Image: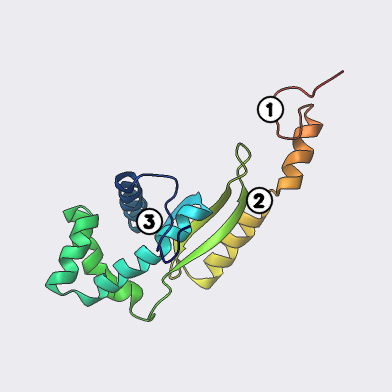
């Protein structure tokens, strides 16, 4: 039992989990949006919010916390632009947009992005584009059967 144990282990040892978090956070702050699984996005979104709070504070201790995660050039750029990007919001800097399931292992895919990313009109366009691309599990099974494969899409259907 994992009573009173905080965080998601993501089926990895501690050093791999920390490295994964560091690389996902670096990609998120570099590109503004990443495509990942739901479990990873949920594990990272809280840490991203803490980093944004550190970026807004700009004390020496907060700069050192951010420097642990990001390379020097990215950290300097983030501190330079953080006040303008996140000044109007107190918390909840990230959002998760669900995309559907991955065909190979039916993992839930999501976009993890910053809330301030783009104007509301641009966000509506992105949502419309994403809704056109999403496929549900039942649709994937129907497509697999139509293509002459089994329900999971692996190999040919079994015959007697």
Farthest residue to the top: give it. 160
| Neighbourhood count class around disc 3 (C-alpha, 10 Å): few under 14, some 14–19, many 20 upward | many
Marking on residue 108: none
Farthest residue to the left: give it. 60
Marking on residue 28: 3
Distance from label 3 to label 2 (Cα)?
22 Å
Residue 95, image x and y in percent? Answer: 49, 66
| Neighbourhood count class around disc 1 (C-alpha, 10 Å): few under 14, some 14–19, many 20 upward | few
Q: Quadrant of residue 29?
A: bottom left
| Neighbourhood count class around disc 2 (C-alpha, 10 Å): few under 14, some 14–19, many 20 upward | some
Q: Which residue is more in the foreground, 124 or 134?
A: 134
Which comes sooner in the sequence, label 3 or label 2? Answer: 3
Q: Is residue 10 above or below residue 152?
A: below
Where does label 2 land, which residue? 134
Front position among marks 1 and 2: 1
Q: Is residue 99 above or below residue 141?
A: below
Residue depicted at 45% across the width and 64% down the height:
3
Residue depicted at 61% across the width and 36% down the height:
104
Q: Is residue 24 above or below residue 92?
A: above
Residue 9, image x and y in percent? Answer: 42, 52
Side of 50 relative to 94 (left or right) = left
Where does label 1 land, which residue? 154
Front position among marks 3 and 1: 1
Q: Quadrant of the C terminus?
A: top right
Dot 3: element: helix
Which comes sooner in the sequence, label 3 or label 1? Answer: 3
């Amino acid at each position: 039992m994992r009573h009173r144990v905080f965080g998601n282990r993501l089926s990895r040892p501690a050093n791999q989990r920390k490295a994964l978090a560091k690389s996902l956070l670096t990609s998120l702050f570099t590109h503004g949006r990443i495509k990942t699984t739901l479990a990873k996005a949920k594990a990272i979104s809280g840490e991203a919010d803490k980093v944004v709070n550190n970026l807004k504070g700009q004390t020496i201790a907060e700069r050192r916390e951010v420097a642990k995660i990001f390379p020097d050039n990215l950290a300097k750029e983030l501190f330079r632009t953080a006040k303008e990007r996140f000044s109007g919001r107190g918390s909840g800097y990230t959002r998760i947009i669900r995309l559907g399931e991955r065909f190979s292992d039916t993992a839930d895919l999501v976009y993890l992005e910053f809330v301030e990313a783009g104007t509301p009109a641009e966000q509506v366009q992105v949502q419309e584009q994403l809704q056109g691309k999403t496929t549900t599990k039942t649709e994937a099974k129907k497509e697999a059967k139509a293509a002459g494969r089994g329900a999971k899409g692996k190999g040919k259907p079994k015959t007697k």
